[in-house]
Amino acid sequence: MHFRRKMSSLTALVALEATVRHRSISAAAREIGVTQAAVSRHIAALEEDFGRPLFIRAHRAVQPTAECMVLGHALSENFHGISDAIEAMRTTPKDMVTIGASVALSQLWLIPRLLRFRQDHPGLALRVASRDDRIDLATGEVDLVIRFGKGPFPDGEIIATAPELVFPVCSPEYAARHDLSRFPNCRFDLIEQDVPDRSWYRWSDWFAETGSTPPNAVPSLRFTYFTDTLAAARAGQGIAMGWHMLLGDALQTGALVKVGSRQIVPMMRNHLVVPPGKRAGWPVELVKRWLAAELVRDPAAG
């Protein structure tokens, strides 16, 4: 997006945000270190740009219009985000190791292992970048990433690989209330995650691959995140698609149980990927070797 073509003057927007927050042109001018006249000119320029008034002038104060309040709130949130990012850049140690992963993998697989790893390496600076969109290693945002997909990848070198297992799971309480010995040819409730990524199995994919034609294959609960899907299953709301690496210790503790004996090994796999040709320092090398060993050690890899 060519946002510069759509953006008004950043200096003017800074002046606007301060004026909205203080309800005062003079207070805004003092905060940003310019004259009252300069702030007034900035606001006048924005009003001409937007084709509408932004403030109702009073004797000692200005009152933003409803539309201006919405803009001021958005500016304030984004300015705070920019400020936090800049502060992080200034204070982040150069030897901090950043690991990228999806939100679910971070919460359910990586972080429990990371806490144990830190006990052995308390002085190591670590950062986890969790998000569900693709993390590009070429940007330098992370030092290594755990990526689910089919290699090779143009932006990185695969260091270690572990397969996944997909199978239905539910809480023991739900299993006790339903006769699941005939699943999926029995009465049940399905929980599903809504994701655009086609590498992620949906119930329709699972039934097709296992050759099942259940009478009620439409999920009754849907969530955006897998963590919420799993929480609903643990709460006894139905049967969810269980991804082995994302179940944590739920099967060992009995919080969740497998439904039936069928399982799928997806074509996609979990890969530890690092930037190609980049010479890593000892902190990155240490984390890389540890994560590679953890991936291989995962029971699904067997």
Image: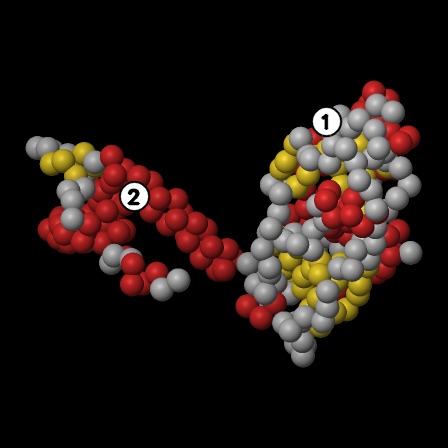
The location of residue 108, given as percent across then percent down, is 73, 44
Q: Mark 2 is on which residue type? A: Leu
Q: Secondary structure at mark 1?
A: loop
Q: Secondary structure at mark 2?
A: helix
Name the residue at 80% across, 40% down.
213
The quadrant in which the C terminus is found is bottom right
The location of residue 31, given as percent across then percent down, is 25, 47
**Residue at far bottom of view:** 277
The location of residue 250, given as percent across then percent down, is 81, 36
Q: Mark 1 is on which residue type? A: Gln
Rendered position, 36 above or below 124:
above
Rendered position, 153 above or below 57:
below
Rendered position, 156 above or below 208:
below
Judge whether residue 120 can be spotted in this image. no
Mark 2, residue position: 71
Judge whether residue 73 can be spotted in this image. yes
Local crowd at mark 1 within 10 Å, few (<14), some, or many (≥20)?
many
Q: CA separation, marks 1 and 2?
A: 41 Å
Mark 1, residue position: 237
The location of residue 103, given as percent across then percent down, is 64, 48
